[in-house]
Image (cartoon, rainbow, N blue to C red):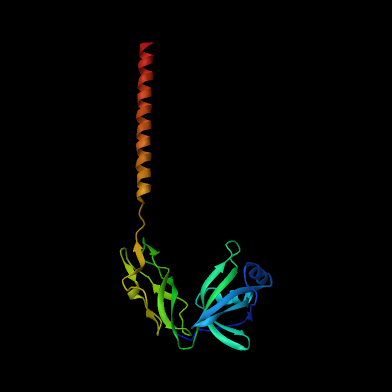
Amino acid sequence: MSESNENVLNATVRTEFGKGAARRTRRAGLIPAVLYGHGTEPVHLALPSHDTFLALKGNSNALLSLSFDGKSELALTKDVQRDAVRRTIDHLDLILVRRGEKVIVEVPIHIVGESAPGTIHTVDLQTVRVMAEATHLPEFIEVNIEGLAEGSNVRAGELTLPTGSTLEDAEDTVVINITVPRASAEDLESDVASAEAGAAAGDAGEAETGTDEGAAAGE
């Protein structure tokens, strides 16, 4: 696994706090953030919106190199708050890391290949927790399901992890299941109900026809 690219962001220290101050920060094209960890006092920062968005796009474990007050600190994203409608970043919680330090992160699963014809795959675990050096974090873990038959599954302990990473989830945790699509119980009940309704309608039609014929004979 190659060393993670460091995304350099020029930050400024915030001296105003609260919702009003956060709104003013966002209107200025900046993202409010808090950096903490290693027993240090939290540092309130403002990050450039566009550059931060690009740094985190597609990689939740992006390594950030933050420059502020004449120094540089490495950080990982601990929490991202987004606008529910626009999906822009409203706030970031960042955790301080050191070179060579090992951290636990959640890494997304990427599926490649196709399971056996007539089958489908379901991903029971979207991410797995691994421990790795902060500067050597995997962006994703690839799982090849090519040709897997019905009833097959892939467990966490069977994943091929990047060199230097170790699994933190239970090894027997199911990550992917291979199944054959079948009608659900609700679909079957609906089909039975429709068939019964159709049969009942047919019986009623026959009874009505019999009654009409009897009436005609009486005339």
Quadrant where the image shows the N terminus? bottom left
> In this rendering, would 173 be left or right of 5?
left
Q: Quadrant of residue 32?
A: bottom right
- Specify the quadrant of the image occupied by residue 30: bottom right
User: Along the line of sight, which residue is nearer the eye, 1 or 164?
Assistant: 164
Of residues 23 and 59, the one drawn nearer to the viewer in this rendering? 23
Looking at the image, which residue is at 37% across and 23% down?
A: 209
- On the image, which quarter does residue 149 sit in? bottom left
Residue 126 % position (x, y): 43, 68
Residue 130 or residue 149, whichever sits in front: 130
Q: Which x, y percent locates residue 82?
A: 57, 67
Location of residue 219 with respect to 1 vertically, above or below: above
Residue under the point 35% across and 26% down? 206
Q: Is residue 148 left or right of residue 65?
A: left
**Quadrant that contains the C terminus:** top left
Give the mark count: 0
Q: Is residue 33 above or below residue 201?
A: below
Residue 39 in the image: x percent, y percent? Answer: 49, 83
Q: Which residue lies at the image location 54% right of the left edge and 71% below the top edge?
A: 80
Classify 174 as above or below 217: below
Q: Residue furthest top?
A: 219
Expressed as whole percent of the image width and height from the top left, the position of residue 154 reads 34, 70
Q: From the viewer's perspective, is 62 left or right of 176? A: right
